[in-house]
Image (cartoon, rainbow, N blue to C red):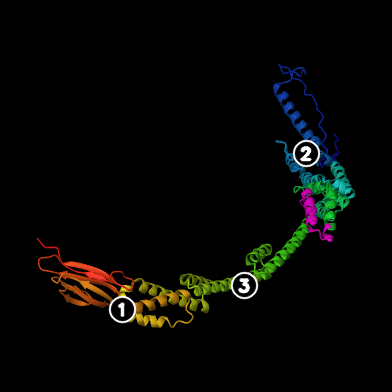
């Protein structure tokens, strides 16, 4: 180790005191040098130790407290976690028992020297951290000149440091750090620029430019894997754009289905191809528009032919393609309105036919159906009321005709006659009503024409003919009775009463009625 002179280390040179051996004293007190007392030996040993300590403090201690030579920055580039400050702390160890207060001026200079050394090491550590980042991002490739210049500055700082020229080393490290900082700031900019350039090149089918851009981007730390994905896409880019070219040619000739297939084939190869995705969407829209027009045309054609079901189906198909289409909604409403109007008209016509055919209940049902379709239909309301009235008349006439015997009652006969006169004033009566009126007219006439019958008895039975009166006892009587059902009761003392029911009618074969009580009571 190199040892400096007294001006170099800050200490005044101390020269050792010449050592003089003490004459040994004989045990007998004589001056014989061969015999040295124990006390003298101890004093000499202590003095020797003090002398050695002074030599160590003056000549060796300054070099011991110097900072060990710094490790070359090239070796530290991959391990920026070295705590260089810890080495500074270890260099401040003091020697116990040594009095250095006489050298305070030299100590202050050493402290300043250590502070400067610590600052220098701080810049070095920062430089190494930045250098490590740049190496991970391959700055030596994309910024060769600047990166090399930065390394040179750091190496120059290393040389100055090893020469303990800390001030100059700091300047060199600062210059190198500034270069590295500038390059670190460019990492994201250059990476993003190349990713964007590569994406644009992929979108335009420029394989070479895309490959170059992503190759450059791949030099950087790529956690998102965009560069790797971009490079993979460049391998199939030419094939992708072959399909895109075919699709564009198909579009130009309006072969939309072929264009869609070609664009889809391009996306099957590379789902991230923006132009293919956009073009496929546009093609699908064109196909949708074409299908929309086809459905609308078919719908209007069906509407023209009053084929409403088909028209509604077609318009609904068009509306499914374009749910917000006003034209499709309007066409659908128009179709439904026309279909309803036609259905109402057909229902009213059918109801009128049922009326003419005197199918009153069927007519009522049809008019009711029409009113469900449109509640404010005057024709349906009046037609339904008319049919209900006719049905009531029909049912009443049927009941009268089914009970002709009731007409034997003069009051009933009068009421039915009045009703008959009202009904026969109906305008344009149908066949059914006409027949009912004719039958009723005949029934009224017949029921008002007396018919001759003969009553016979035993001249001992007292006879009563209900609806006519008491006949008394007789053997034979001739009567003229209105058609109908009659009851005759015969009574005789000591005999059971006899009851006879008979009908008087024009067509009746029974012209003679015998009434006699002949069964004795025991």
Marks 3 and 1, how far apart at CA: 54 Å
Judged from the image, the secondary structure of the residue bearing numbered disc 2 is loop
Give the residues drawn in magenta, as a range. 250-275
Indicate which label's residue lies in the foreground, 3 or 2: 3
Contact? badges 3 and 2 (CB < 8 Å)? no
Are there few (<14), some (14-19), or many (20+) residues within 10 Å of tag 2?
some
Residue 86, percent from left and from top: 73, 41
Mark 3 lies on residue:
338
Q: Left or right: where does residue 264 sit relative to residue 475?
A: right
Mark 1 lies on residue:
412
Q: Which image quadrant: the C terminus?
A: bottom left
Nearer to me, 448 or 510: 510
Mark 2 lies on residue:
65
Marks 1 and 2, how far apart at CA: 151 Å
Furthest residue toward right: 145
Judged from the image, the secondary structure of the residue bearing numbered disc 3 is helix
Specify whether residue 150 is in view. Answer: no
The verdict on residue 262 being magenta is yes
Residue 108, percent from left and from top: 77, 46
Q: Is residue 198 above or below residue 520?
A: above
Are there few (<14), some (14-19), or many (20+) residues within 10 Å of tag 3?
some
Give the quarter of the image for residue 13. top right
Indicate which label's residue lies in the foreground, 3 or 1: 1
Going 78% across and 39% down the picture, which residue do you hit?
65
Going 31% across and 70% down the picture, which residue do you hit?
508
The verdict on residue 480 being magenta is no
Q: Earlier in the sequence, mark 3 or mark 1?
A: 3
Going 33% across and 81% down the picture, which residue do you hit?
415
Could you tell me what secondary structure mostly forms the magenta stretch? helix
Residue 99, percent from left and from top: 73, 38
């Amino acid at each position: 180790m190199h040892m400096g002179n007294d001006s170099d280390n800050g200490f005044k040179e101390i020269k050792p005191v010449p050592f003089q051996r003490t004459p040994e004293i004989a045990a007998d007190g004589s001056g014989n040098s061969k015999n040295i007392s124990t006390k003298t030996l101890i004093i000499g040993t202590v003095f020797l130790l003090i002398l050695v300590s002074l030599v160590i403090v003056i000549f060796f201690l300054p070099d011991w407290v110097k900072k060990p030579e710094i490790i070359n920055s090239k070796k530290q580039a991959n391990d920026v976690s070295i705590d260089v400050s810890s080495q500074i702390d270890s260099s401040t160890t003091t020697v116990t028992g040594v009095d250095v207060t006489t050298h305070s001026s030299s100590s202050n200079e050493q402290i300043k020297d250590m502070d400067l050394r610590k600052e220098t090491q701080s810049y070095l550590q920062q430089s190494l951290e930045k250098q490590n980042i740049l190496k991970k991002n391959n700055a030596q490739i994309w910024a060769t000149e600047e990166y090399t210049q930065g390394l040179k500055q750091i190496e120059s700082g290393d040389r100055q440091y090893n020469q303990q020229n800390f001030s100059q080393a700091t300047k060199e490290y600062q210059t190198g750090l500034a270069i590295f900082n500038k390059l670190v700031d460019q990492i994201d900019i250059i990476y993003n620029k190349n990713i964007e350039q590569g994406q644009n090149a992929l979108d335009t089918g420029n394989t070479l430019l895309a490959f170059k851009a992503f190759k450059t981007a791949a030099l950087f730390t790529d956690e998102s894997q965009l560069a790797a994905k971009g490079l993979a896409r460049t391998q199939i880019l030419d094939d992708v754009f072959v399909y895109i070219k075919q699709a564009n040619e198909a579009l130009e000739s309006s072969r939309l289905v072929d264009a869609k297939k070609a664009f889809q084939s391009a996306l099957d190869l590379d789902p991230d191809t923006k132009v293919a995705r956009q073009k496929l969407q546009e093609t699908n829209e064109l196909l949708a528009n074409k299908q929309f027009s086809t459905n609308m045309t078919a719908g209007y054609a069906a509407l023209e032919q009053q084929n409403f079901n088909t028209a509604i189906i077609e318009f609904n198909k068009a509306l499914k393609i374009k749910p917000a289409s006003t034209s499709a909604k309007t066409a659908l409403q128009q179709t439904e309105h026309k279909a309803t109007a036609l259905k109402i008209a057909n229902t009213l016509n059918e109801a009128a036919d049922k009326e003419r055919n005197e199918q009153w209940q069927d007519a009522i049902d049809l008019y009711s159906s029409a009113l469900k379709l449109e509640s404010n239909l005057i024709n349906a309301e009046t037609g339904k009321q008319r049919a209900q009235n006719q049905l009531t008349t029909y049912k009443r006439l049927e009941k009268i005709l089914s009970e002709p015997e009731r007409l034997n009652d003069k009051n009933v006969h009068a009421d039915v006659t009045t009703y008959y006169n009202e009904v026969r004033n109906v305008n344009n009566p149908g066949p059914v009503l006409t027949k009912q009126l004719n039958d009723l007219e005949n029934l009224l006439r017949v029921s008002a024409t007396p018919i001759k019958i003969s009553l016979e008895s035993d001249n001992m039975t007292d006879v009563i003919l209900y609806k006519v009166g008491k006949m008394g006892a007789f053997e034979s009587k001739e009567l003229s009775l209105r058609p109908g059902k009659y009851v005759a009761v015969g009574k005789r003392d000591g005999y059971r009463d006899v009851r006879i029911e008979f009908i008087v009618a024009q067509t009746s074969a029974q012209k003679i009625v015998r009434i006699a009580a002949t069964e004795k009571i025991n």
